[in-house]
Image (cartoon, rainbow, N blue to C red):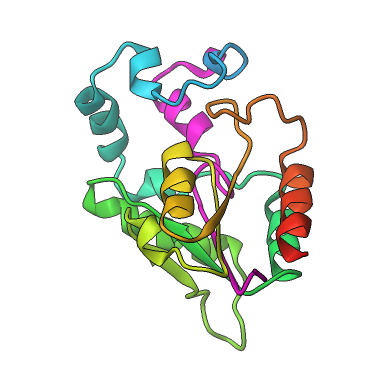
Amino acid sequence: MPIKHIFLDMDGVLSDFFSAALRIHGRLELLDEWPRGQRDIPGVLGLSRRAYWNKIDEQGSVFWASLQPYPWLDELIQAAREVAPFTILTAPSLAPGCSEGKIRWMYEYFPKVEGRSFANYMIGSQKHLLAQPGHLLIDDSESNTDAFNSSGGQAILFPQVWNRNHAVCSPVEYVKSKLAEFAR
């Protein structure tokens, strides 16, 4: 089935939430020591989920708006564009400032088109509801990609240290090869 539309996750694929979360908790040393395949950041930090998120939520929209883009941002966007139109599909935290910060981030890193701010995004945690033949999700979350596949879409698990693709050395090349497979 040809790809008709690509949904790109933001945090962990386009923006570096992981480093920012470790930084705000004073644990940047874990960047090089992270247990491979482990997604439970609060658990590794020895924090309750509430304590972990409270520290992030205290920053409001600033935390999300100031996430650094990954160095492969432009290359990954270009690879997606060569295959199909794309939409940023990002899940919010429970804090009201999260969505605002994510929108500000997109305005910063995606150029205006014909004088209008970037608006090709969707915010919500139920990503699998967009799954259908011809729709492809690129996400760093195993549960999101598994649910998208199970719901009739196709998905690429973006390689990161916290997922089962942690051994992949070049995340963008991996995605490009998977896109080529799906495009056949």
Q: Quadrant of the N terminus?
A: bottom right
Task: Name the image quarter holding the C terminus.
Answer: bottom right
Report x, y in % for residue 3. Answer: 64, 69
Give yes or no for residue 149 being in the magenta stretch.
Answer: no
In the image, is residue 141 above or below residue 138?
A: above
Q: Position of residue 28 (x, y in %)?
A: 52, 18
The residue under the point 50% across, 44% down is 67
Q: Nearer the viewer, residue 182 or 165?
A: 182
1 vs 157, nearest the viewer: 1
* Coordinates of residue 133 in the picture (x, y in percent): 53, 68
Q: Quick check: 100 above or below 163?
A: below
The residue positioned 47% from the left and 67% from the top of the image is: 132
Residue in view at x 45 percent, y 53 percent: 148
Q: Nearer the viewer, residue 184 or 58?
A: 184
In the image, is 163 to the left or to the right of 184? Answer: left
User: Quarter-wise, where is residue 170 in the image?
Assistant: top right
- Nearer the observer, 66 or 35: 35
Q: Residue at x 23, y 46 (%)?
A: 94
Q: Quick one: which residue is furthest to the bottom in this view? A: 114
Q: Can residue 14 be found in the magenta stretch?
A: yes
x and y percentages locating residue 141 in the rendered image: 47, 40
For residue 51, what is the image quadrant?
top left
- Looking at the rendering, the stretch of residues picked out in magenta corresponds to 1-29
Total number of numbered labels? 0
